[in-house]
Image (cartoon, rainbow, N blue to C red):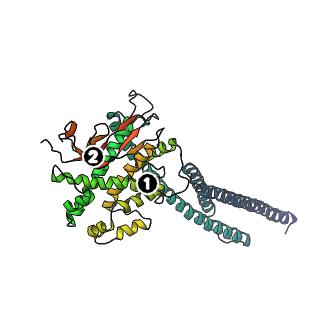
Amino acid sequence: MPPSGLREIQNRENNNQKVHPQPMEESITQNQEAMESMISKIFTNISSLKAAYIQLQAAHTPYDPDKIQAADKLVIEELKNLSELKHSYRDSNPKPPSASPEDSRLAAEIREQQSLLKTYEVMVKKFQSQIQIKDSEILELQQQIQESNQKRVKLERKLKQRGLLAKDSEDSEEENVLFSMDLTPSLFSAVVESTYKSIHDFSKPLINLMKAAGWDLDAAANSIQPSVLYAKRPHKKYAFESHICQRMFSGFDEESFSVKAENLTVSRESFFHQFLALRAMDPLDILSQNPDSIFGKFCRSKYLLVVHPKMEVSFFGNLDQRNYVMSGGHPRTPFYQAFLKLAKSIWLLHRLAFSFEPKVTVFQVRNGSEFSEVFMESVVKNVIVGDGDDKPKVGFMVMPGFRIGGSVLQCLVYLSGVKCTE
């Protein structure tokens, strides 16, 4: 073969060698750099996800809805970034023909991070579920607050109608103030009136249960207040109201109200604050929050004093309710709830009485005393009251009276042997 032909073949081989090696090395280098960049991004995002997850945990103790939402958004953002990296890797490497040991190691690390990612996704969903539960609880509490505000507005209207709430202009910003701090006899008088109504209301179910149990109401009334001449037979209900008052007002002049507890000495401002705080609350709600509070102990002691064990046995056939009360509980029975309304009204009256300076004092009148219009008021409104020697006598006191500084709130009495107008 001529030299010129040999040189031509060698040149061709050299040219063929120059076409392939260099582009293949560049491609391998680029793939390695892309893979290293991908792995670096994955580890960075995993670290960021861990940090966001820790932040989400910290926002739950104490519970902070704003911080939880911010951390939740951050976790979701990091999860989206990892998802995008996963799709980017799959698009760039659809189905590699073969895997080197280095590629296998990287693939194993990716699978490990993906498994960790799924774990975080499960935990995030769990926290999101907890957030939804907390949000539902918040909405429920907001609804309760709204209902309480509606009740407060209704109460304000009633108090304004009775002159117990300062009537500012309609555009006043003080609508949330139910009472001014100036205590007046008219305020106490209105609460006394409400208290007597609660006594009257509780006597109704008490008498009805006695009737249903077959009690002799005439004999029961005579045992409570003997030797009383009633103008009408239905007036004997006042004997039962008297029985309730005698026991409920026992210890009223004491700051402790006959409740044995420590550290009961408080200022008159504290007494008034308690009056304001409890006046609009349901007594069962108060006791459910703190069944062993001073008010809870007061309710238990007065219930056991007002309702005799024989009554309970005849009413309910057992002493289960009494035993439950004695053990420190507050049953949710209709009868006990009716009693709690009575107990709350007496308790509030006591709190208000000790809010005055000097404190309000209670007074009573004896059976057989001569009727005095200054200190007494007949519980029956249509009685005929004579003058001079014809003045009627007190059969019994239904509800005690009160002294507020120089003012007197008359006690309610039932007059014996008087006539009633039609």
Query: Which is nearer the eye, 284 or 17?
Result: 284
The numbered mark at residue 388 is none
Which label is found at residue 286? 1
- List x then y, in percent, for residue 298: 43, 57
Q: Is residue 279 left or right of residue 49?
A: left
Residues 129 and 407: in front is: 407
Quadrant containing the N terminus in the rendered view: bottom right
Image position of 22 with respect to 275: above or below: below
Front residue of 63/216: it is: 216
Distance between the alpha carbons at the discs numbered 2 and 1:
33 Å
Q: Nearer the viewer, mark 2 or mark 1?
A: 2
Q: CB atoms at circles 2 and 1 under 8 Å apart?
A: no
Q: Residue furthest front?
A: 389
Q: Which residue is mark 2?
A: 413
Q: Position of residue 354 (x, y in %)?
A: 46, 43
**Amino acid carrying mark 2 in the image:** Val
Q: Earlier in the sequence, mark 2 or mark 1?
A: 1
Amino acid type, label 1 = Ile
Q: Residues within 10 Å of mark 2 (few under 14, many from 20)?
A: many
Give coordinates of residue 385: x percent, y percent: 20, 39
* Mark 1 element type: helix
Q: Quadrant of residue 26?
A: bottom right
What secondary structure is marked by label 2?
Answer: strand
Is residue 116 depicted above or below 239 in this figure? below
Query: Can residue 248 be seen in this snapshot?
Result: yes
Seen in the picture, residue 104 relative to 366 is either above or below; the reply is below
Q: Position of residue 284 (x, y in %)?
A: 39, 56
Left or right: 67 in relation to 317: right
- Mark 1: few/some/many CA within 10 Å (<14, 14-19, 20+): some
Q: Residue furthest right?
A: 3
Looking at the rendered image, the quarter that the C terminus falls into is: top left
Decide if residue 332 is on the left or right side of residue 78: left
